[in-house]
Structures are given as structure tokens and as C-alpha cells.
Amino acid sequence: MSLRSLSPQPSLVDQVYEALLSEITEGKFGPEERLIQEELAEALGVSRQPVQQALLLLRSHGVLCDAPGRGLMVAPLDPAHVRNLYEIRLALDGVASAGAAERARDIAASEGPAYIERGRAAVGTQSIARLIAADMDFHFFLYRLSGNPLIAEVSEPHWTYLRRAMAGVLVHGSTPTGIWDEHEAILAAVIEGQPQAAERLSREHVAHASIALVSQMQPADAVDRRVVSRGRRVGRTDLQGTGAGVTGRGFG
């Protein structure tokens, strides 16, 4: 039997999903605006099928909800849901950091500093997309080093919702401070092979992030009216280079 080798490139559905999520994350679609399949497909230069599948995925991840009558719109942010997600992250991130300290000290030492450097650089840019992407990259780096592939698999859908909540705070001018100091401390404990310290620091970091994010979340309708008034439609070029993630004392 001969099998055709698989392409490492993301599927068209994945590209559409990421393009739409990036637009939503940056506030370019709001709950007062319906997401129309035909318009999105035309803007992205694709057929309706990948758009429909991407929209259903976004709905299943809590980013979209049913609009009155028919269709979909961006779901209001729910602080209680964000708190629940961070409770899950508290456990998962702690296990990941401890596992990384036990199993991957050398990789952490050789690759980890670059993640910290990129994160601090992102803070200087004030770019929401770069802030969120750098934060996610660091945490998924630790998930990879943990030696347990299920951590990343279980965490990924939760990050979809969290990155939108993070952006909702950042778009109102809340500048992350201190998060990369906390990240650097976690990394140092991993490199030094101290699983208990790495787990403790990671859990404290997630707890700080939860308190900071939820306390700064504004009512969804206030956020949405602002972003809808300055929104723009997603375009074809948004299928390339879309990214995500966040920082700060503490969002990540």
C-alpha cells in the first residue's frame, strides 16, 4: 500500500477559521452585526462551504452564538465563563510546567529565552495580535515540553475564547505589565529542574491572569458598540499571516 504524503499546510477551513477569529478578536465584528456566509465567502475569495464549517467551529467554541431569527453573531463576553476557563488552565499549566522541569530542561534552556525575548518585544509594539501570539506561543512551548500531548490538545479550544477576552481588554488601553517577568521566572524554574517551583509559579501566574482579566472586562454591549462603529470587513489577504495570544500581569 502506498499513501500520499500529507501537506503540512493548514486546510482552507483552518485558514478561514483563523482569519475570522482574528477579525473578531481585534473587534472588527461585534454582536450587533450578523456574520453572513455569502459576504464572508466573497470577501475571502472562497466558496461557502469552508466558511460555513469555520462558523460552526467558532460557534462550538463559544465565540459565536445564534442571532435572533436566523444566522450567527459574535457572542457577548462572559466573565464567569472566563473564570471557569482559568480554573482549568490553573491545573493544566501547573502540570505542564512541572512536566517540562522534569523532562525537558535542556530544550527549555536552549529555546526558551527566545520566547521571552519575543514577548518583551511584543509589549513594546502595543500590537494586540503580537501580544496575544507571543503569550500563546510561550504557553504552548511549555505544553510541548511537558511530554504530555493531551495538555495542548485539551487547552487549545479554551485559548480560542480567552484570546478574544484578552483582546477585549487590550483594545480599551490596558497595557500588560509584569507578565513576562512571571514567564521568565517559570522558565528559570523549568531550566533549573525544579518541578514543584515551576508548578507553583505557573499556578500563581494563571491566578494573577484570571483576576486581572476578569476585573478589567467591560460590559459586552459597551465594547461591542465601540468596535462595530470602527469595524471593517474581512478581506482576502486576511487568509495569510493571521495570528493570535496575550501577556500582562496578567492576561496569559
Image (cartoon, rainbow, N blue to C red):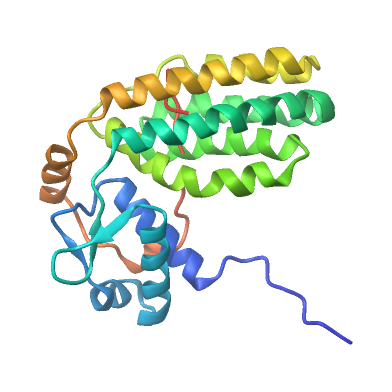
Quadrant in which residue 174 is drawn: top left
Image quadrant containing the N terminus: bottom right
Foreground residue among 136 and 147: 147
Foreground residue among 250 and 242: 250
> Residue 7: where, in percent of width, then height?
68, 71
- Give the vertical position of 178 relative to 38 (above or below): above
> Residue 86: where, in percent of width, then height?
46, 31
Quadrant in which residue 85 is drawn: top left
Quadrant in which residue 146 is drawn: top right
Q: In screen coordinates, is 120 left or right of 231?
A: right
> Residue 149: where, in percent of width, then height?
72, 46
Q: Is residue 20 in view?
A: yes
Residue at x-position 14% and y-position 50%: 228
- The total of numbered circles placed on residues is 0
Q: In screen coordinates, is 195 left or right of 238?
A: right
Residue at x-position 77% and y-position 19%: 191
> Residue 41: where, in percent of width, then height?
32, 76
Q: In screen coordinates, is 23 left or right of 138?
A: left
Residue at x-position 65% and y-position 29%: 114
Q: Is residue 244 in view?
A: no
Residue at x-position 41% and y-position 59%: 60
- Give the vertical position of 8 relative to 230 (above or below): below
Q: In screen coordinates, is 180 left or right of 49?
A: right
Tell which residue pokes out farthest to the right in this image: 1
